[in-house]
Image (cartoon, grey):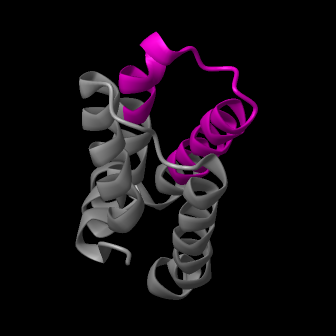
Amino acid sequence: MIDWAQVSQLRDEIGDEGFAEIAAAFLAEIEEILDDLHSGRIAAERMEGTFHVLKGSALNLGLSDFAGICAQAEISARTGQPMPDPDWLVGVFRVGQDAFLKEMGARFFV
């Protein structure tokens, strides 16, 4: 699910041109971090901070389902609980990313 009110707020704050750049940067950052998680390049002691960054990027783009999972993973990392499966995490992100990209143009750039 996409929180379009949050996306609209971000867009209103930075404008159309800036919004497209920021959205692309957030998506690229999430992709890079997920790739690092998937390949095991993030040490256990960095997991809490990593999921905090993912959560923040996701919230800025209105990716509320993915952000919720990242919030729970952040808590799990802090308390030593199991982390989410990286393949599943990537899948959840892809669903949100696809919805975001599909609707973004229609909502903001008509």
Q: In which quarter of the image is residue 56?
A: top left
Q: Which residue is drawn at 36% across and 66% down?
A: 65
Q: Where is residue 80 in the image (x, y as percent from the top left)?
A: 32, 25
Whether residue 102 sits left or right of residue 41 in the image: it is left
Q: Position of residue 47 (x, y in %)?
A: 45, 24
**Where's the N terminus, which quadrant?**
bottom left
Q: Give the range drawn in magenta.
A: 22-51
Q: Quadrant of residue 77?
A: top left
90 up-or-down from 4: above or below: above
102 up-or-down from 82: above or below: below
83 up-or-down from 50: above or below: below
Q: Which residue lies furthest to the right in this view?
A: 39
107 up-or-down from 83: above or below: below
Q: Where is residue 85 in the image (x, y as percent from the top left)?
A: 57, 50
Q: Residue furthest front?
A: 81
Is 37 inside the magenta-drawn segment?
yes
Q: Viewer-proximal residue, 92 or 107?
A: 92
Is 27 inside the magenta-drawn segment?
yes
Whether residue 40 sits left or right of residue 3 in the image: it is right
How many marks the image carries: the answer is 0
Q: Which residue is drawn at 24% across and 26% down?
A: 79
Q: Residue at x 62, y 75 (%)?
A: 98
Q: Which residue is drawn at 54% across and 79% down?
A: 99
Q: In which quarter of the image is residue 30?
A: top right
For the stretch drawn in magenta, the main secondary structure is helix
Whether residue 105 sits left or right of residue 69 in the image: it is right
Q: Viewer-proximal residue, 6 or 69?
A: 69
